[in-house]
Image (cartoon, helix red, strand yellow):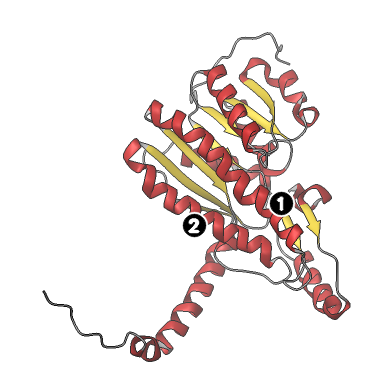
Amino acid sequence: MKSASLAPTPGPAGKIWFITGASRGFGRVWTEAALQRGDQVAATARQLASIADLTQKYGANVLPLELDVTNAEQAKMAVAQAHAHFGRLDIVLNNAGYSLVGTVEEASLHDIRAMYETNIFGTVSVIQAALPLLRAQGHGHILGTSSGLGHYTLPVIGYYCSSKWAFEAVHESLAAEVAAFGLKVTIIEPGAYATEFGSPESLRFAAGLEAYSDFKNEFFAGLRSTERGDPAATPAALFAVVDAAQPPLRLFLGRHNLPEVRAAYAERLATWEAWAPVSEAAQGQLASITH
């Protein structure tokens, strides 16, 4: 094991990461994979104890930081501390998030707002904290963990899907806004994987209504039969993106998202085409304004 007293020793890639949600799931897998290849990581989690072992394994190449992304001031301080500690940040990876389970009728406004505080507002807080530093550097890569559900939806987790649609829109706009500063943006879109995302820490359940019991039972039965990918197979794809001279705006992880998204967009296009005459008639005929 490496000693915590070791000085930072960047490996061949030599990249410096800031990762939220590093205690479990993809955040943990990607944090360890980056450290194992010799990169340095500011790893953040709501509870420092959940990532304390990283220092024992990787010494000074990891900087564990406590961060609740719903606390904008804490996010600003954590990003600044990481930047000051390592001297720069090459990659800012927003991975913290959770799913709200419940139909549109069942979920309370309180539950919906709480999920958005983490999935959207927390992400934005980290991005806004990092951008002045990245612009001053003249380089940086912002990554965000979205989902294939940022392009299509499932029932019962519709509010979670909606947060990923918002997540996609924020990052797509961001990419256009910061390109002139030499900054890159990539949205990582995993399919179903065997991570802790289904654990109590990653799920919140709305109070149920009896009217939806049968529907939800059938839905959950279908989910249990879903083929899940191996999280350990994903770091190579992530590294391919961060090491690329021209990284993509979006990257699917797994083989199931592309067919699902292709079918979803084909259906939408077919509907828009079928209703095109009605849509075009709604344009109206306004007289041209002349001066």
Q: In this view, does 187 lie above or below 226?
A: above
Tell me the element at label 1: loop
Q: What kind of residue is marked 1? A: Tyr
Q: Position of residue 54 (x, y in %)?
A: 72, 25
- The residue identified by callout 1 is 98
Question: What is the spatial separation of the Cα atoms under label 1 and label 2, in whole angstroms?
Answer: 18 Å
Q: Is residue 94 above or below residue 44?
A: below
Task: Say which residue appears at 61% left-offset and 48% top-offset.
Answer: 121
187 horizontally vs 78: left or right: left
Q: Is residue 17 above or below residue 228?
A: above
- Residue 248 visible in the displayed image: no
Q: Which mark is residue 180?
A: none
Camera-side residue of 96 and 264? 96
- The residue identified by callout 2 is 169
Tell me the element at label 2: helix
Name the image quarter holding the C terminus. Answer: bottom left
Q: Residues within 10 Å of mark 1 (few under 14, many from 20)?
A: many
Q: Where is residue 179 in the image (x, y as percent from the top left)?
A: 35, 42
Q: Position of residue 64 (x, y in %)?
A: 69, 25
Q: What kind of residue is marked 2? A: Ala
Task: Say which residue appears at 67% left-offset and 47% top-offset.
Answer: 118
- Residue 64 visible in the displayed image: yes
For marks 1 and 2 on the same chain, the one whose residue lies earlier in the sequence: 1
Q: Residues within 10 Å of mark 2 (few under 14, many from 20)?
A: few
Camera-side residue of 156 and 232? 156
Name the image quarter holding the N terminus. Answer: top right
Q: Position of residue 102 (x, y in %)?
A: 77, 67
Name which quarter of the figure residue 9 lies in. top right
Residue extending farthest left: 291
276 horizontally vs 18: left or right: left
Q: In this view, does 278 lie above or below 171?
A: below
Name which quarter of the figure residue 234 lies in. top right
